[in-house]
Image: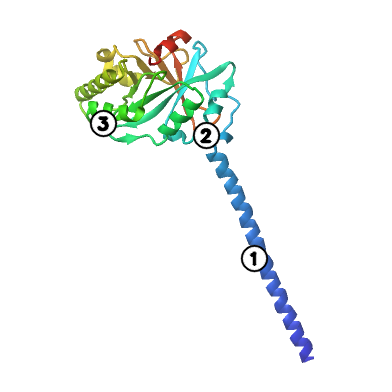
Amino acid sequence: MKKQAKKSKSRSKNKSKNKKWIWVVAIVIVGLINAFILYSIYVQKTNPMEAKYNSFGIVIPASYAIHGIDVSFYQENIHWPAVQAMQVNNVRLRFAFLKATQGLDKTDKQYQRNRIKTKEIGFPIGAYHYFIASKNGKEQANHFIKIAQLQKGDLPPVVDVEELYGTPPNTMRKELQECLQALEQAYHVKPIIYSSASFYKTYLGNLFDGYPLWVAHYFATERPRINRPFLFWQHSDQGRVNGIHAKVDFNIFNGDEAAFNDLLMK
């Protein structure tokens, strides 16, 4: 009887050990499955080739023939062949503005990659500098010139001015003028000013009407509400494009094919 009792206890211990191992194996398997699912989600979110859409997700102004986007580090890695190939109702993207620099010393971490990849597929690009009104305008221009490396076939340089950064409007205008003059001297072409319709009307106005304007004004359907000629119009910041996971700014060129080609740097 004692031997049988010992055997019974031994079998009971073995069963208990087996159950523990079963639980351990089950937990490991569940963990591996969850890890695989999370990895798959991560790959889908970070691989730009996985970003595919049935439409641009916004209303496209119908009376303009040439459409494009602008991007920065926010859009992360972009699969540019997919961007170039996407077509919805006869609308294809024809150009892109890339953020290059900001202030005196900041460089967009995706600029060089975006520039190389767009050049590989012959996609027309321009580069823009995010202007800091409280910093020296000429030095900002020199920083942009060093990094952007614009060349023949590119769109003219762009200065993005959106905020005062606590500086008096007259000081902002002085530094902006110096920045624009330095860029024009370097590239022998008038730089483009990017600004919202409201900021331009309030702080820039007639003083800068001699420069081409890229105006940001959302929710209008036919044209931006600004009483001066404009070259580009950023009409939405909610677009979707194949090859890009994040939302994208959409723009139109206010002209025909011949005018667009004439705009490219010679």
Label 3 or label 1, whichever comes before in sequence order: 1
Pointer 2 with pointer 3, Cβ within 8 A:
no
Label 2 or label 3, whichever comes before in sequence order: 3
The residue tagged with tag 1: helix, strand or loop?
helix
Say whether residue 112 is visible: yes
Residue drawn at 52 percent across, 23 percent down: 58
The residue tagged with tag 3: helix, strand or loop?
loop
| 65 relative to 209 in the view: left or right | right
**Mark 1 highlights which residue?**
24
- For the residue marked with disc 2, what is the amino acid? His
| 220 relative to 45 in the view: left or right | left
Residue 247 screen position, x and y as percent: 49, 30
Vertical placement of residue 13 versus 73, above or below: below
Say whether residue 256 is visible: no
Question: What number is the disc on residue 245?
Answer: 2
Q: Distance between the residues labelled 1 and 2?
A: 38 Å
Residue drawn at 57 percent across, 23 percent down: 85
Residue 46 screen position, x and y as percent: 53, 40
Colour setting? rainbow
Residue drawn at 49 percent across, 22 percent down: 122
Q: How far apart are marks 2 and 3 (CA)?
A: 31 Å
- For the residue marked with disc 1, what is the amino acid? Val
Label 1 or label 2, whichever comes before in sequence order: 1
| 191 relative to 10 in the view: left or right | left
